[in-house]
Image (tube, grey):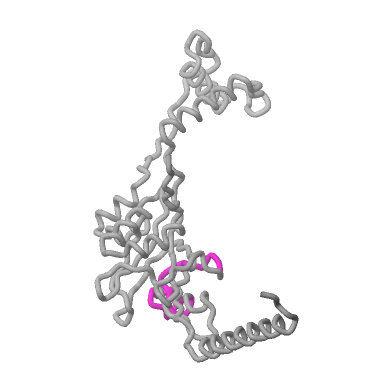
Amino acid sequence: MSLTPRSIKRSSSSIRRAALQRFSSSTSTSSSSTPPPLKASLLLSRTPLLTPTPTELEQTYYAYSRALRHSLSTPLPTEFYFKSGSLPLRRYLKAEHEYETETYGERLAGGKPESIGDIPPETEYEVLPRNHWEQQDIKDGKGDKSLERYPEEEVYCLVQDKQKKWVFPSTGVERLQSLDEAVNERLIGPSGQLDGKGMDSWLVSRKPVGVVRDGEQRTFFLRGHILAGQPTLAPSSNYTSHAWLSAKEVEERLRNQGDEKLWEGVKGMFGVAEEVDEEL
């Protein structure tokens, strides 16, 4: 079949007309429909209080690196840093000899320097265990409401609503209102549901760190940190209790109450990688 210029022009005009009709119908539909509801949720966390305890492999690596640096480095010029015959100098020489004996053995370390002499004992200090404050809060009955839980890990705040369900603190976002304004005003502000007057907390950024979609509703998560204090839930609040949980405990509570979909949507904000099925 041969196509004349007139037939080509007619077909292109009909396509253009149909496209315009579809665009106008979609525009009218979108303008008449209401925008999807937006919610702002707070991912409030307390950063680790202590550096993590090194593993056995890390301890071995650090000990080997220290021994290597010690054997290759130039000896410390003690005459520059210490006064001759002073107590700090003798303590340094004693500690240095003990380390060399433990690391290289008595044959390479040599005998004990005669200049050390008798050294008076140093002042003894009470060394507290790393989980001292956590254990103290457990004795006081605070349990998972203690902000000092898991001092080597980051803990997150979950709240329990009136239906006995654990959720993240969240609030609706009004029209022409930013996400950080909604969180500051109705969650961690002085008159918020978490009563910001009793917390030393702040938002890390005005931009969300993630979004979870549930049908038409979209929940944007903002990251916040707390330094001290506790949420004080008023009777008029939508929540009845709170807890400071590790990432693993957050996963367990959400999964146990049937919110696997919510956890799958937020686990990336906790640093949990997606599981990838590798085909062998």
Q: Is residue 38 or residue 41 the one in the foreground? A: 38
Residue 135 locus on image (x, y percent): 29, 50
Residue 269 place in picture, x, y as percent? 46, 59
Q: Determine whether, in the image, residue 135 is placed left or right of residue 205.
A: left
User: Does the stretch in magenta take in 34?
Assistant: no
Is residue 238 depicted above or below 222 in this figure? Answer: below
Can you name the residue that lies furthest to the top here? 107
Residue 80 located left or right of residue 31: right
| Outermost residue, right side | 5
Give the magenta range.
184-205
Choose between 139 and 163: the one closer to the eye.
163
Q: Looking at the rendering, which quadrant does residue 8 occupy?
A: bottom right
Q: Residue furthest front?
A: 1
Q: Quadrant of the C terminus?
A: top left
How many tags in the picture? 0
Going by the image, does 52 lie left or right of 25?
left
Residue 188 lies in the magenta stretch: yes
Does residue 135 lie above or below 177 as drawn? above
In the rendered image, which quarter contains the N terminus? bottom right
Left or right, 22 with reference to 126: right
Q: Percent x, y for residue 263? A: 37, 61
Give coordinates of residue 89: x percent, y percent. Answer: 57, 25
Judging depth in this view, the residue of 264 and 29 nearest the camera is 29
Work out whether 189 lies above or below 110: below
